[in-house]
């Protein structure tokens, strides 16, 4: 008996490990290989608890069809498993009868709930309990089938809880003695007890649940009761990771954690363990292992009384969303005794449990967080408790702020390590993340802070980076963080860019993870493969929208928020649309995206909107780059910055920045009829589908304004010379093209007149800090602009240093390929600055 006890293990299989018949068969195979004493705790099959709860929720609001569907799905999934795991015979019949009865009872309960119109926690617990019970019964049957002695033991006979339905607390002593009485005889005969997780029984005999994810707690309760050696939780992750892998793609396995640390990680919302799972075994010699069901040979995470990884003062980050901060505030509170105590008594009276208590900016308030749904009850209870103080003005108000997330930075090594808080808050400040409140760390083993939900994912990533958590356990962090690109618009330029990213082998660290168009989005956090991209490109070419190509049809702002909330690394949003996207871009910058523009409109609107966009990017590490807006791939903005950085002063910029206008005007100057030049520009794909968009000069004017603003110009946009005569402006495209010949003679005359003076026509933009223009002008044929041909662009910088002869940047300035190249350049420069930051912080360590 003594050896048996020392060797005893409790294995818990989570929902993902019991998803279907194949998964259960693998679980059974793992159990069979283990020849020591064992108790098994089973969760419901993956997704079943949600299914039952959703069906019931639908029933309360009259959705009987949905409840019926849930019952049918419940029946189907369990029957499938039973049929494929247990051969025809008495055992299978028993199982199928239980499944049928459960589904029927579920239906009946739903009907009753529909009549009542609400779902009390007590009824809800009874309803979901069948998920775990059936699952455990099936595992027991499958084990017997595999010739291991096994018995189903109902948890409601063992786990004694209080009557707090929906999140009951176990009674350790009572549970301990029942567990020993029920399970020891089975262990003595080498029988594996299979116990449903998650559920227990209240003193009044009703069924309770331990709160979502409660099977973890069932396992540690049983381990404590039986003095087991270890608990193993088999999950769909390799173990406990440094952060939720759905948020941080660089999250890594933590090889070992102290009980206390794991308890904090769980308490602060890392879904990987139930918040109270560590309580029964804290302070004991029982170890808990979180292991990969997918790779059962890997050791996973050991949670024990050992201390290791002392180089890492911070080991993990946890996050709880959907929180509200409730504040009791009033100047009269300073120094008044007992307000804090009364606050928490009032909250406790409502059986609400506060997750974090916050330090106020001044002494005159007390704040705490709890789930949003409970905020109203807390506020009402507090208002009653402090009725007199509110009336007398001692307390000014009691408020709830919703939409918050609480992030906990956890690690034993933080005690006594100086500067941890500073590192956390510097990383957040660098990311432009606004910390709403900071928790009073009683344990010093964690720092928690609250941020608004939309900034939470980025906050987690920043702190994860700041502590180099991607290297924990000796693993090498990638040499540079990846750069994840999301394309806003997937037209010609977007497709050329996707292709260039795919074929740039040396830069495997840049990949496309998302596409957005007017219809919806496609998001692949691991990167959209090159094949899929080119397949999507050809479907788009044929006129399809992303929503038709497997994308989700939601507005772009929603799509971006969704992506920002996922495991994106150094995300960059590339705008290749020609829409007014300023609002969206600002939102992206605010949620951690850098932005690269080929789209000129957001930079060429009102001064106010331009300034707001710049301000959004000045905040934190998110940058705004827009090389491709002027001169496509030519380094024009870049040249300006280099001149400015080296102390030169740019006095004026002149140039030809429209490929189409260059082509048309230079061809006309060389003797071609205007109508023919325009036709060729359209046919060769230089011009917009309707060439009037270019000929109007509007596009050139936008570029001029972007250049002028770079120089400090704050005035209005220039009114460009329009090369389309007024009478042709509003014609349908075909009529317009047909009548274009009417203007040929006029152009011929003008060209001849200038040629006589040694001059040619060019469409020239000019920018200074005080003025900006976009004009058709005549320039000497010998000047750099006069010598320019084809679609080439040219920009001349006149500066303090280049005063007599300007610095000229010239080359091909139009077309999807070169525009994509300009964008790619911006993306690489963002990726490189991220890399420099990583190397710098490595040197600090
Ligand atoms: P079970 O199948 O045992 O119920 P859960 O699904 O409850 O397992 O927990 C595992 C999930 O927890 C993972 O799929 C992962 O998405 C999430 N998770 C959140 N934070 C962490 C973390 N720090 N480490 C590992 N997984 C985490
Ligand atoms: N099945 C329950 C849930 O989904 C309990 C658990 O999985 O531990 O929350
Ligand atoms: Mg769970």
Image (cartoon, rainbow, N blue to C red):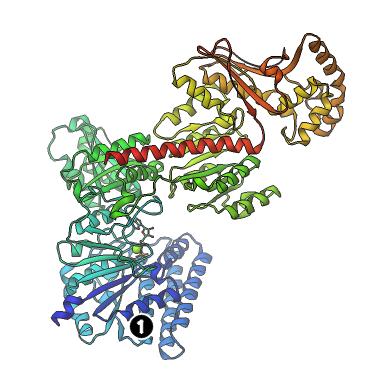
Given the current orientation, which residue lies at the most extreme bottom position?
A: 89
At horizontal 30% and vertical 86% (from top left) the residue drawn is 149
Location of ligand 3 given as a quarter of the image: bottom left
Left or right, 365 with respect to 613, comes to: left
Answer yes or no: is residue 20 visible.
yes
- Residue 662: give x, y in percent of width and height: 71, 24
- Is 212 above or below relative to 250? below
Q: Quarter of the image holding residue 516?
A: top right
Left or right, 675 with respect to 582, comes to: right
- Is 376 above or below relative to 208? above
- Residue 531: give x, y in percent of width and height: 60, 55
Residue that carries the numbered disc 1 in the rendered image: 143
Left or right, 823 with respect to 138, comes to: right
Confirm or reject: label 1 Cβ below 8 Å from ligand 1: no
Count numbered badges in the picture. 1
Q: Quarter of the image holding residue 844?
A: top left
Quadrant into which the N terminus falls: bottom left
At horizontal 40% and vertical 76% (from top left) the residue drawn is 26
Q: Is label 1 in a helix, a strand or a loop?
A: helix
Quadrant into which the C terminus falls: top left
Label 1 neighbour load within 10 Å: few <14, some 14-19, many 20+:
many
Left or right, 682 with respect to 166, comes to: right
Pick the residue in front: 739 or 110.
Answer: 739
At horizontal 22% and vertical 47% (from top left) the residue drawn is 313
Answer yes or no: is residue 725 visible.
no
- Residue 727: give x, y in percent of width and height: 82, 22
Pick the residue in front: 612 or 135.
Answer: 612
Pick the residue in front: 709 or 584.
Answer: 709
């Amino acid at each position: 008996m003594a050896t048996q006890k020392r060797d005893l293990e409790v294995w818990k299989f989570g929902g993902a490990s019991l998803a279907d018949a194949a998964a259960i068969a693998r679980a059974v195979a793992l159990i069979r290989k283990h020849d020591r004493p064992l108790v098994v705790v089973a969760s419901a099959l993956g997704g079943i608890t949600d299914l039952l709860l959703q069906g019931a929720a639908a029933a309360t609001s009259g959705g009987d069809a949905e409840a019926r569907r849930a019952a049918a799905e419940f029946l189907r999934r369990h029957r499938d498993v039973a049929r494929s795991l247990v051969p025809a015979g008495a055992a299978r019949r028993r199982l199928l009868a239980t499944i049928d009865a459960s589904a029927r009872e579920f239906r009946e309960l739903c009907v009753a709930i529909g009549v009542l119109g609400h779902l009390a926690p007590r009824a809800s617990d009874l309803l979901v309990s069948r998920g775990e019970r059936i699952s455990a019964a099936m595992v027991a049957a499958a084990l017997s089938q595999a010739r291991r002695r096994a018995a189903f033991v109902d948890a409601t006979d063992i786990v004694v809880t209080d009557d707090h339905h929906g999140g009951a607390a176990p009674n350790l002593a009572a549970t301990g003695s029942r567990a020993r009485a029920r399970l020891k005889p089975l262990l003595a005969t080498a029988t594996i007890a299979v116990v449903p997780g998650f559920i227990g029984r209240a003193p009044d005999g009703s069924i309770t649940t331990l709160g979502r994810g409660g099977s973890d707690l069932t396992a540690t309760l049983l381990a404590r009761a039986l003095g087991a050696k270890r608990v193993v939780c088999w999950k769909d992750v390799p173990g406990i990771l440094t952060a939720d892998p759905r948020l941080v793609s660089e999250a890594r396995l933590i090889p070992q954690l102290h009980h206390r640390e794991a308890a904090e990680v769980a308490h602060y919302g890392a879904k990987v363990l139930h918040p109270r799972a560590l309580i029964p075994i804290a302070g004991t010699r029982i170890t808990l292992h979180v292991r990969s069901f997918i790779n059962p040979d890997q050791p996973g995470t050991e949670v024990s009384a050992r201390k290791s990884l002392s180089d890492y003062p911070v080991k993990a980050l946890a996050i709880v969303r959907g929180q509200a901060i409730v504040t009791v505030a009033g100047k009269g509170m300073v120094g008044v005794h007992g307000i804090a105590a009364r606050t928490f008594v009032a909250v406790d009276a409502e059986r609400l449990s506060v997750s974090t208590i916050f330090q106020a900016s001044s002494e005159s308030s007390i704040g705490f967080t709890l789930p949003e749904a409970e905020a109203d009850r807390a506020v009402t209870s507090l208002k009653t408790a402090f009725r007199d103080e509110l009336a007398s003005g001692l307390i000014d108000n009691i408020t709830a702020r919703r939409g918050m997330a609480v992030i906990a930075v956890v690690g034993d090594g933080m005690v006594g390590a100086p500067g941890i808080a500073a590192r956390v808050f510097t990383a957040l400040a660098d990311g432009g993340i606004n910390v709403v409140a900071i928790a009073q760390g009683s344990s010093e083993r964690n720092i928690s802070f609250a941020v608004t939900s939309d900034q939470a994912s980025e906050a987690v990533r920043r702190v994860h980076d700041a502590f180099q958590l991607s290297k924990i356990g000796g693993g090498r962090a990638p040499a540079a963080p990846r750069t994840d690109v999301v394309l806003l618009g997937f037209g010609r330029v977007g497709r050329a860019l996707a292709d260039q990213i795919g074929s740039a082998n040396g830069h495997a660290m840049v990949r496309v993870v998302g596409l957005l168009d007017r219809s919806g989005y496609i998001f692949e956090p691991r990167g959209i493969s090159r094949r899929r991209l080119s397949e999507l490109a050809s479907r788009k070419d044929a006129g399809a929208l992303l929503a038709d190509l497997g994308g989700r049809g939601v507005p772009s702002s929603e799509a971006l928020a969704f992506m920002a909330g996922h495991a994106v690394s150094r995300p960059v949003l590339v705008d290749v649309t020609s829409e007014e996207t300023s609002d969206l871009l600002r939102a992206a910058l605010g949620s951690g995206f850098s932005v690269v523009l080929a789209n000129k409109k957001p930079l060429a609107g009102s001064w106010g909107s331009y300034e707001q966009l710049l301000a959004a990017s000045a905040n934190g590490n998110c940058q705004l780059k827009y090389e491709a807006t002027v001169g496509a791939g030519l380094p024009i903005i870049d040249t300006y910055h280099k001149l400015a950085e080296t102390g030169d002063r740019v006095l004026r910029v002149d140039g030809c920045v429209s490929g189409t206008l260059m082509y048309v005007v230079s061809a006309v100057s060389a003797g071609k009829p205007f109508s023919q030049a325009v036709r060729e520009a359209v046919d060769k794909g230089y011009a917009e589908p309707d060439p009037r968009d270019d000929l109007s000069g509007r596009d050139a004017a936008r570029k001029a304004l972007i250049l002028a603003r770079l120089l400090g110009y704050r005035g209005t946009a220039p009114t460009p010379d329009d090369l389309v005569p007024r009478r042709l402006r509003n014609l349908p495209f075909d009529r317009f093209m047909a009548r274009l010949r009417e203007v040929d003679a006029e152009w011929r005359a003008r060209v001849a007149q200038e040629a006589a003076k040694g001059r040619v026509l060019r469409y020239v933009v000019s920018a200074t800090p005080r003025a900006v223009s976009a004009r058709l002008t005549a320039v000497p044929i010998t000047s750099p602009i006069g010598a320019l041909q084809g679609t080439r662009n040219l920009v001349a910088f006149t500066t303090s240093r280049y005063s007599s002869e300007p610095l000229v940047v010239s080359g091909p300035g139009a077309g999807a390929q070169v525009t994509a190249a300009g964008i790619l350049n911006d993306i690489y420069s963002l990726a490189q600055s991220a890399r420099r930051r990583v190397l710098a912080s490595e040197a600090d360590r």
